[in-house]
């Protein structure tokens, strides 16, 4: 497992397809929705319960596309989360942390009606 390519599970893809619709967030880019999802999950201090996620969908993006110009910041956040969870920030642990938090965050996006709109996402970010 590495950070070179970020892949999604089929259930995560299905949820993002729903979130991309104009009636929902209307955000058309996978990477933007995934960044919101990662931030929401990293904000939650609890450890994700799911550790093994099958990334079986046809959605994948490079780390550069996922993280954009802020890739150093995202990498630092993931390493810090590894340390907070009692893990060494090795490449493998950082990649696994990305996958589990990304998927938990996607669940948060679709599971909370307030977070299924642009306004709700911004409001949740401001309230934190």
Image: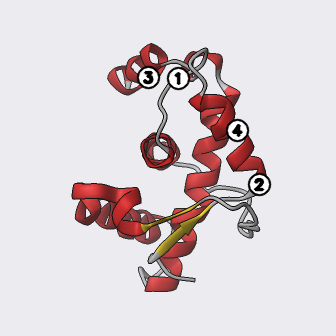
Q: Write down the residue under mark 4.
A: 15
Q: Which residue is mark 1?
A: 25
The residue under the point 37% across, 70% down is: 79
The residue positioned 44% from the left and 68% from the top of the image is 62
Indicate which label's residue lies in the foreground, 3 or 2. Answer: 2
Q: Which mark is residue 67?
A: none
Q: What whole-number distance in Å separates the C-alpha atoms at marks 4 and 2?
A: 9 Å
> How far across and down, in percent of the image, does residue 14 sit?
74, 42
Numbered badge on residue 124: 3
| Position of 21 relative to 4 (above/below) | above
Give how far apart the Cα atoms at labels 3 and 1 are: 14 Å
SS at mark 4 in the image: helix
N-term-proximal mark, 1 vs 4? 4
Q: Which mark is residue 10?
A: 2
What is the C-alpha distance between the residues marked 3 and 4? Answer: 19 Å
Frontmost residue, 22 versus 115: 22
């Amino acid at each position: 497992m590495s950070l070179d390519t970020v892949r999604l599970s089929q259930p995560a893809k299905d949820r993002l397809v729903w979130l991309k619709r104009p009636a929902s967030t209307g955000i058309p880019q996978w990477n933007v929705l995934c960044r919101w999802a990662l931030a929401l999950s990293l904000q939650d201090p609890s450890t994700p319960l799911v550790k093994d996620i099958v990334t079986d969908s046809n959605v994948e993006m490079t780390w550069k596309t996922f993280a954009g110009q802020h890739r150093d910041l995202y990498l630092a956040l993931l390493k810090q989360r590894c340390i907070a969870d009692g893990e060494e920030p090795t490449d493998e642990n950082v990649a696994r942390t990305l996958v589990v938090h990304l998927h938990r965050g996607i669940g948060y996006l679709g599971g909370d009606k307030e977070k299924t709109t642009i306004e709700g996402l911004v409001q949740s970010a401001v309230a934190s």
